[in-house]
Image: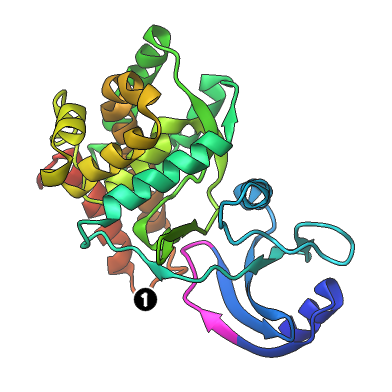
Amino acid sequence: MDLPQFVETHWAQAVRRIEVLTGGLNSETWTVTTATGRYVLKSVPAHDAGFIRGLELAASLDRRGVPTGAPIRTVAGSLFERTPDRSVALLRWVDGEPLSAADPRSGARMGSMLARVHEAGATEPDDLETWLRILPFGDDYLDYEPWIRPAVENTLEATRELHARSRMTWVGLHGDPSPSSFLVRGDDTGLIDWGATMFGPALYDLASAAMYLGCSIDEAGPEFVVRAVEHPGSASGSESLVAGYLAARPGMIDEVRLGFGTYLRVRLCVQAGYFAWRCANDIRTGINSAEENQQGLRHARESWGIQT
């Protein structure tokens, strides 16, 4: 694909400069400079429904003042353009420095921003069984390591029991809120990379962010929320995350107390299944070596508390 010509044709922007960005595990990205500014060009497989949902949610949140790297509409008025095998979008550039799990201040900022996103993207609960298809419970690669399939089966049962007891809040989910997706500029925070977007329980985003901050199942016990709320100054990164979230959404405290541990298990099962699939099929998109897939699976295993 001639990228400068593609951009000029579909967005009427004459490209002055285009550079490869470090892509995600499932996408290709470029920095594009035109006469009107700097943008990100993002390309994913054409069948990636999460990418399209992400463009729609990012655009909706952008209209409400949340910096999301929202898509620029094509000359035909679409949020993206499709080729025979790719979906391609031109995204607004969001200034700022990415957060880091190593920075103790990151958790509170991530929690505050997720609360803002969830407030703006609230929706009615949908069918839980349909949503639980994010868990890869029927796939052969769950036997890549012996602990994965039982963990998924037990997590499915626990999640169903939780929802049978309590009503969970559903929102538009970012889906994969790692620290590097949060960009900070002064007092402003943006949230980019909306390729895993879906609608689902708010706790899934909160648990996903906590996972990236190193939260383990052992840490997320009954006293986790108490420590987060009552001792925010001495809290871990994941506790600061929850404290920042609840400071903005105090009405969620009972829900977080009841369901955070279960949703951390859900997120770790998704992570384990994803990296087991990549390992079993030797998928190396977005990485330099097969060892990086093993590292991702090892992190999920250790966060679950399983030693080998």
Left or right of 69, for residue 212: left
Q: Residues within 10 Å of mark 1 (few under 14, many from 20)?
A: few
Principal secondary structure, stretch drawn in magenta: loop
**Residue 73 rendering spot, x and y as whole percentages:** 79, 62
Q: Which of the 4 image quarters holds residue 17?
A: bottom right
Identity of the residue drawn at 44% across and 20% down: 168
Q: Quadrant of residue 184?
A: bottom left
| 145 shown above or below 72 | above
Q: Nearer the viewer, residue 32 or 281?
A: 32
**In this rendering, is residue 90 above or below 127?**
below
- In this view, the residue in front, 291 or 70, is 70
What residue do we see at 72% from left, 82% from top? 3
Task: Identify the residue at image location x=33%, y=73%.
Answer: 289
Locate the N terminus by quadrant. bottom right
Whether residue 109 sits left or right of residue 235 in the image: it is right
Task: Locate residue 31: give its quadrant.
Answer: bottom right
Asked if 138 appears above or below 38 in the picture, the reply is above
Amino acid type at image mark 1: Asn
Taking depth in this image into account, of 245 and 208 the one nearest to the observer is 245
Q: Which residue has dot 1 on it? A: 288
Looking at the image, can residue 93 be seen? yes
Name of the residue lying farthest toward the bottom:
16
Q: Nearer the viewer, residue 280 or 188?
A: 188
Q: Which residues are magenta?
A: 19-26
Q: Is residue 264 magenta?
A: no
Q: Residue at x 29, y 44 (%)?
A: 241
Expressed as whole percent of the image width and height from the top left, the position of residue 24 reads 48, 65
Q: Residue furthest front?
A: 187
Q: Is residue 147 above or below residue 212?
A: above
| Residue 181 picture location, percent across and down | 43, 59
